[in-house]
Image (spheres, grey):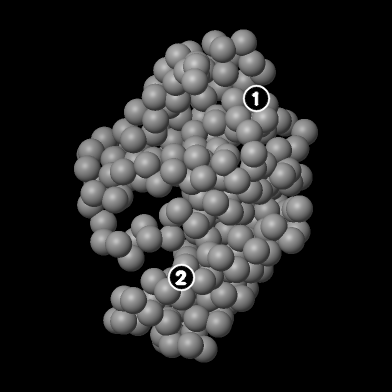
Amino acid sequence: MTINMGALAGFLTLFVIYQIAEANGLDILHIPRKPLSTFLLFIGVIIAAAIVAYGQGANGLAAYGLDAGGWLYYPLGVLLGVAVQGVMEGVGLLLGIRKVSDFRLSLTRLAGGFIFILFANFPAAAAEDLITRGYPFRYLQSTPVVAFMIFSSFLYVTNHILRLATKPVTDWYHLPFTGLTLAYALAQTHSLWFVIGLHQSGNVIYYLMRQMMNVENTTNVRRRIAYGIASELVFLAVVMLVVH
C-alpha cells in the first residue's frame, strides 16, 4: 500500500496544532486569557487546515466539504441532532439514568444559551471534524463507506488522546459510536456543514440542560454507559434513515 506522505504530513501538522488547543482547554496548558485563548486556538486549527489544503493544491476548506454555498446544511444538522438527542435525554430521565432538579426554565435563557453554545463551540467542533472526517474523506472517497467509518472513528478517538489519558471512562466511552455516526453522515452527504451541526447538537443539549436545571447521573456506571451506547446507536440509526 502506497502512503501519501504529503497527506500524512498535513494530517500530523493539523493534529499537533489541535492538541495544543485541546490541552489549553483541558488546563494542561495555561495560555493567558482563557477561554478566549482556547477559542482562538481552535480558529487557528481551521485556518491551518485551509492553508494545508491550498498548499496541497486544493480549494481551501471546500476540499473538506466545507464550501461557502453549503452552510444551509448546518442548521439541518443541528436541528436533527437536537431532536434525536433531546428525545434520548428525555427517555434517560424516565429510566433514571439522569435526575434533574431546581428548574430554571425561561425562553430567554433557552434562546440565549442555544445561540451562545453554537457560537462558542463552533471552532472546536469544526476543527475536529476537519481533522478526523473532512481531511481523511478527501483522500478516501473511493473506499467502502464502512471502511471509512471505522477509520474516521479511529482518528476521532485518537484525537481525544489527552482526554483518554486524563478523564474517566464515563467522559469518553461514547466516542467510537459518535465517530461512526458523523463519518457516515459525511460519506452520504459530502457536507461537513451538516456533520458539524450534528456534532454540536450533543454539546447544545448538554449545555442547555445544565443551564436550566441541576443534572445528576446515576451512580450505576455500567447502566449509564449501556444507556449511553444505546442512545448513540439510535442516533446512528436515525441519521442512516435520514441521509441514506
Residue at the farthest front position: 1
- Identify the residue at image location x=75%, y=59%: 242
Give residue 13's quadrant in the image.
top left
As helix, strand or loop, the secondary structure at mark 2 comes to helix
As helix, strand or loop, the secondary structure at mark 1 comes to helix
- Identify the residue at image location x=39%, y=71%: 225
**Residue topped by disc 1:** 63
**Residue topped by disc 2:** 228
Q: Is residue 142 above or below residue 148?
A: above
Q: Nearer the viewer, residue 117 or 179?
A: 179
Give residue 147's quadrant in the image.
top right
- Identify the residue at image location x=60%, y=68%: 234
- Identify the residue at image location x=48%, y=88%: 95
Q: Amino acid at mark 2?
A: Gly
**Residue 213 visible in the shown view:** yes
Residue 220 placed where, x, y %?
Answer: 31, 81
Give residue 110's quadrant in the image.
bottom right
Residue 91 placed where, x, y %?
Answer: 55, 82
Q: Residues within 10 Å of mark 1 (few under 14, many from 20)?
A: some
Total marks shown come to 2
Question: In screen coordinates, is 157 left or right of 78?
Answer: left
Residue 231 placed where, x, y %?
Answer: 53, 70
